[in-house]
């Protein structure tokens, strides 16, 4: 891990913060991301003090805003000549429907469109790495169906259903991107981190989950384990390959979501991966 450049979205709290801490202990160059500058600088200072690693950076962006995602990617591209690991960890749960400044339902925008756009903007840097890895944090609560006419709650809205939809989209994106990257050394995999005691879990389902360390350990496995160097397009639960819902393997659903996502973000992957 020493010398590797790692970007972890949503890393000023919860699983992301602990993953950033562990990566810093391994002497990686760690780019911490958050939407609160004061909080981000506090976490940066904490990680530096704890690990002694001063190869740390903070990238500010609200992932509900596509213009801020573009600025985040620009910062990374201007600062680093390659990106070895991208962990799309940030996620939200909202009980009520909110629209972003771009006009999209917030949960769908942050949990799916943000990693779709950010990954595309950083893909050249990832492909310049000899070990490029993309890790998408999904969930075992991902949906088993997808209604393309209700991606933004146009017909009906439920917080739990919107979250489940976004986590299904993480898988559809993972599998489709893995296919598009065939023949390239860059890999992309997804995981369920566990039922972890995070703010998101308490907001959505109440109660207390398993320790943060369990979730971070599962993420670190996908990001760092040497046995996965050539593994791509898979879904992991408790460090084991697992089957996701049947719809997540549908070529038609994958293709349509990809096309819709390119339209919504205005980003075309074609020149990079095809």
Image (tube, rainbow, N blue to C red):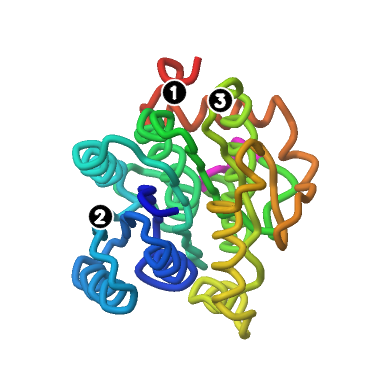
Viewer-proximal residue among 115 and 266: 115
Q: Are marks 1 and 3 in contact (CB under 8 Å)?
A: no
Label 1 residue SS: loop
In this image, 97 relative to 74: left or right? right
- The disc, 1 or 2, on the residue closer to the chain's N-terminal end is 2
| Residue corresponding to mark 3 | 181
Viewer-proximal residue among 170 and 180: 180
| Residue corresponding to mark 1 | 269
Point out the frontmost of discs 1 and 3: 3
Q: Main secondary structure of the magenta part?
A: loop
Point out the frontmost of discs 1 and 2: 2
Residue at 73% from the left image edge and 44% from the top image edge: 145
> Eyeballing the image, is 215 above or below 66?
below
Residue at 40% from the left image edge and 68% from the top image edge: 25
Most distant residue in the bottom direction: 207
Label 3 residue SS: loop
Q: Which mark is residue 59?
A: 2
- The disc, 1 or 3, on the residue closer to the chain's N-terminal end is 3
Q: Residue 133: x, y in percent? A: 51, 42
Residue at 75% from the left image edge and 55% from the top image edge: 240
Give, as a single range, the part of the protein colored magenta.
147-152
């Amino acid at each position: 891990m020493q010398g590797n450049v790692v970007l972890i979205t949503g890393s000023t709290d919860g699983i992301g913060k602990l993953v950033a801490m562990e990566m810093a202990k391994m002497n990686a160059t760690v780019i911490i991301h958050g939407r609160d500058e004061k909080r981000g600088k506090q976490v940066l200072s904490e990680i530096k003090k704890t690990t002694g690693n001063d190869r740390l950076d903070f990238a500010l962006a609200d992932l509900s805003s596509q213009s801020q995602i573009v600025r985040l990617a620009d910062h990374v591209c201007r600062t680093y000549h390659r990106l070895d690991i991208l962990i799309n960890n940030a996620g939200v749960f909202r009980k009520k429907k909110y629209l972003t400044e771009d006009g999209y339902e917030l949960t769908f925008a942050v949990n799916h469109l943000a990693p779709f756009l950010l990954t595309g903007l950083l893909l050249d840097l990832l492909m310049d790495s000899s070990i490029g890895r993309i890790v998408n944090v999904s969930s075992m609560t991902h949906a088993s169906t997808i209604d393309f006419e209700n991606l933004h709650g146009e017909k009906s809205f439920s917080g739990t259903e919107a979250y489940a939809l976004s986590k299904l989209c993480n898988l559809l994106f993972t599998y489709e991107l893995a296919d598009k990257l065939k023949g390239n050394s860059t890999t992309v995999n997804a995981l369920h981190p566990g039922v972890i005691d995070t703010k998101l879990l308490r907001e959505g389902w109440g109660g207390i989950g398993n320790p943060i360390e369990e979730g971070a350990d599962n993420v670190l496995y996908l990001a760092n384990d040497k046995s996965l160097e050539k593994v791509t397009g898979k879904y992991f639960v408790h460090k084991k390959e697992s089957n996701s819902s049947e719809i997540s393997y549908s070529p038609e659903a994958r293709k349509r979501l990809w096309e819709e996502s390119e339209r919504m973000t205005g980003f075309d992957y074609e020149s990079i991966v095809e």
